[in-house]
Structures are given as C-alpha cells and as structure tokens.
Amino acid sequence: MAGTDSSKILELSPAPVVVLCEPQLGENIGTAARAMANFGLWDLRLVNPRDGWPNERAKAAAAKADHVICRVKVFERLEDAIADLSLVLATTARKRDMFKPVMGPDEAAERMFSQIGAGEKAGLLFGRERWGLNNEEITLADAIVTLPVEPAFASLNIAQAVLLLAYEWRRAARKGEALPFDTESGAPASKQEITGMFAHLEDALDAAGFFTVAEKRPSMVNNIRTMLGRAEFNAQEVRTFRGIISSLERRHERQKPEGNKSSGGSEGNGGK
Amino acid sequence: MAGTDSSKILELSPAPVVVLCEPQLGENIGTAARAMANFGLWDLRLVNPRDGWPNERAKAAAAKADHVICRVKVFERLEDAIADLSLVLATTARKRDMFKPVMGPDEAAERMFSQIGAGEKAGLLFGRERWGLNNEEITLADAIVTLPVEPAFASLNIAQAVLLLAYEWRRAARKGEALPFDTESGAPASKQEITGMFAHLEDALDAAGFFTVAEKRPSMVNNIRTMLGRAEFNAQEVRTFRGIISSLERRHERQKPEGNKSSGGSEGNGGK
C-alpha cells in the first residue's frame, strides 16, 4: 500500500525501544526498522548483530527508514541495551517454564503506554531468527508478550512480530484519534431533500404502474424508503438519484406506446 | 519467533478471503500466504498475477504455508474473484474521492466476523505493489479499510498489510479466548504460608539487628510485606524464599563473632 505523504514531517514522539538480540540477517534488521517507522517507533538497539554494524543489507531493506537506521545503537550485552528502561517486555512464541506474567500485544501496548506517558522508558525484546530469546534474556524482562497466532502455523519473522507490536503501540497511543483519512461525505441531505426524492420516485413508480396491488403499496413504499435510507445520500447524491429517476421516467414515457412492460414496471410484480 | 507446534492439526475454519489484484512479485504472493496462515486465513485469490501461476518464488516465500498456496485460485477479472462474496473491503493507504465508508482494521474485522458468523462470505482486496487498487476496483467494494500508519512513513508491503488485517480478524474471531499459552503459576501459596514466611523473615531481621530504631519497626514491616506481597509468590516460591532467609541467617550466625556488620544488618540502617 503505497501512500507516504512526503509533505508530512516526521516527528519523533516518545515511543517504545526495540531491542533485537543477536540478529543474524541484515535484511531482518532493515525490515524491522521499516516496520517500526510505519507506526512511529524509532529507537532500535542491537545486541551483538552477527554481521556487525553498519550493515548495507539492513540499510537497503529499511526502505528509507533512515531516521531509524541512523540512530541504531549496538551493545555487547543485553543488560547494557536495556539499562535505561524501566519496563521491558520479551516477545516469544514458545511457552517458557518461568513464573512471568504473559500478555497479548494489546495489553503490552497499554502497559508501555502508561509507562511512557509517566515519563519512563519501555522496550520490547525480540530474539534470534532461529530460536528466539534464551531464558537468561527473558529473565531480564518484566513480562512475556505472545501473539495470538495459529498454533499449527506460528512462525513469524522478526519484522512481522515488530510490525504487530508497533501497530498495537500506535493504537494504544492514538486511542480515539481519527484514521489517517475519512470519507468526504459531502453536505448531508436535508430531510426535505430526502422526502422530495422519495415523493419523486413514488410518483414515477405510480406512473409506471409499478404498484400492481394497491393494498400492498404502503408496505412496499416503506421498504423502498428503508432500503434507500440506509445509503445515507448526501445532497449531491440526492440530485444524482433524482436525475436517474427523471431519466428513467422519460425512457418509460418514450416506451409507453409499446405497452407497460418496461423493466421498472415488471420488477414491481413481485409485490414485495 | 519460531514456535510452530507440529503436533497441532491445522483446521480450516470459515475466514475472510484475500484477493490480490495484479500482484507483480511472486515473493509477495508467498509472504502474503504465510501471513494469512499465521492467523488462520487460507482462501487466497489472484487477479491477473503478472508472472502467471503456479509461481515457484511464491511457493518458496510462503515458508510451508502449503495449505494456502495449493488452494490459490486465479481470475482474469476482479468481478469474478469476488462473485461469491457478500462483503468486500478494499485496503488502501491513500484517500480516495469516493463516498465510501472508511474504517480501521478493527472495525473491518468486526464487520467480517458478523458477516461470516451469519454464514456469508467476506473478503479483503489488496492492490498492486506500486500503486495499490485503482478506483474501478474500489468501487466494487462495500467499504475502504485503512491502517493507522505514520503519515510520513506509510508505505507497507502487501504481506504486512495482509498480516495486520489477518491479525485483527483472529482477534475478532477469538475474542475472549485465552492466549496460546499462559503463565504456569504453580499452586498458589496459602495465606498461612505467606504469613509464616513474613514471620520467619521478620524474626531473622530482628535477630540480625536490622530494625535499629524500634518505633520505626511497624512501618518498616508493613513496607516489606507490601513489597514482597506484590510478587504473589506461589507455594514453591515461598519455600525458596524461606530457604534464602535460612541460608542468610546461618551466614549471619557464622559471622556473629566478628561483629554486627553483616550486609543484612547494615541495609536496615536506612530506616525506610
């Protein structure tokens, strides 16, 4: 989904830190950086990246998330990478024999949001491509985050795990805020315009012989009004719809000499 | 996050259809299939894939999501790909000049969940790598779904967009269900065990001369109980903690001849 608005200035607001423990492939560091950037995260820390740092493959895979890549910090020990954080959550797909609280990504995001809102720093740990975090690393975390994946197909790559947690962070942080864009719904139609439109349609249908059974007319009119009412036409759309009716009416009038079998009329025979 | 449990049998429950319009790269088809599999989606349809079908690169990128890849259906026209669906949502990151409802992924998932729960079929449209869906394609949808990305860095690849919507689907479909695993918290400690542990600790601290100011003892005891209480020890952990106290007590006793300067005692001098 292409859609970056380059007129928007990137703001680095307080957000969770992402710590990758011993990442092996530069590509994964890059795609994780990109996933962070998608949802406003920017502080990426690496513990012992296998291929060192800087890493050209990471840069290439980051797809212009330069503001994340250029801020990457590298550490030898996880303890140092998380030293300034006061809340650390470890992501893992496997159950651990540890008495640590386990939470879903939504609860994790809420926890980080309260912590960060209070001026503290919070971070997420992600493990190696092959086998995730080891138990010593998880022991350093306050809680475990796990994703509600299909148990028979649970393997998520690092960038995808980062993406889901970054997405939940943004949801928690922007609760109640509007979507990036919304429907331009136009000036709403007044009730007068709506009832005028219904009257126009019903007159046209009367003229076309749509209501073949007189006693069914009221309920059919109600159904039509309900059905069209759900579309919530705006003023312009009411005009468009009246144009459609007028146009069909004239077609009908043109066909009148040939009988009453226009399509508009025949649909009425169902008496629904 | 490695963690697929191969003892679990994959069940194909009713779930949203994913339609990719004119995908260009086989890799993206494969990674989209994998993202679907992570959250229980399995019906993937392609409209005019640039490199035809089957596609070896797609298969390789799908990382064993064979149950998705082997079910892929290919169509020439989007109209045919969605013919059996009764709810179609178009994903897009760009604002369109169209009077279509716009919703976030959570609302989209709820809508699809009610539709599918009622025995209907629902689907999600994803556009081309370069420029997404065109307006004619969006016109065929009931509503637009957009993701709450950072506007200054909004570019998501197809697999990531599929992943987020599949994740929200699973959240909506499994609302209230447990996480894939939870803390094994062990047999909870009884209050008798807890108060026994506190008594043991406080006796040990008395013996060690921890409470240097007698009138501060009650509030210090309260603070210690509160502090340790938050850890919610289980029965085994109470035993472990009492073992720690006993062990330190003995150390203290051994050191007694040399004076009262053990570390346990000196920490008490803060009188907090």
Image (spheres, coloured by chain):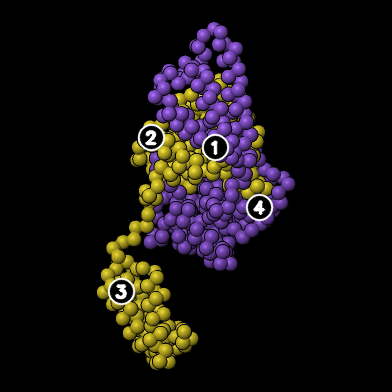
Chain colours: A purple, B yellow
Depth check: B40 or A228 in front? A228
Specify the amino acid type for callout 2.
Ala
Q: Where is residue B6 in the image (x, y as percent from the top left)?
A: 38, 40
| Badge 1 and badge 3 both on one subunit | no
Specify the amino acid type for callout 4.
Val
* Tag 1 residue: A232
Crowd rating for badge 3 (residues with CA inside 10 Å; few <14, some 14–19, many 20+): many
Subunit of label 3: B
Quadrant of the rendered image containing residue A72 = bottom right
Q: At 42% from the left edge and 35% from the top edge, which residue is drawn?
A: B115
Q: Which residue lies furthest to the top in this view?
A: A258
Q: Distance between the residues labelled 2 and 4?
A: 45 Å
Query: Is residue B80 something that shows in the picture?
Result: no
Between disc 1 and disc 4, the foreground one is 1
- Residue B166 placement, left or right of A182: left
Q: How far apart are marks 1 and 3 (CA)?
A: 63 Å
Q: In this view, does B194 lie above or below A52?
A: below
Q: Position of residue A164 (x, y in %)?
A: 52, 48
| Badge 3 and badge 2 both on one subunit | yes
Helix, strand, or loop for circle 4?
helix
* Tag 4 residue: A68
Q: Distance between the residues labelled 1 and 4?
A: 44 Å
Subunit of label 2: B
Q: Which mark is residue B118?
A: 2
Crowd rating for badge 2 (residues with CA inside 10 Å; few <14, some 14–19, many 20+): few
Between disc 3 and disc 2, the foreground one is 2
Specify the amino acid type for callout 3.
Ile
Subunit of label 4: A
Q: In which quarter of the image is the C terminus of chain A?
A: top left
**Image marks 1 and 3: residues in contact by CB distance under 8 Å:** no
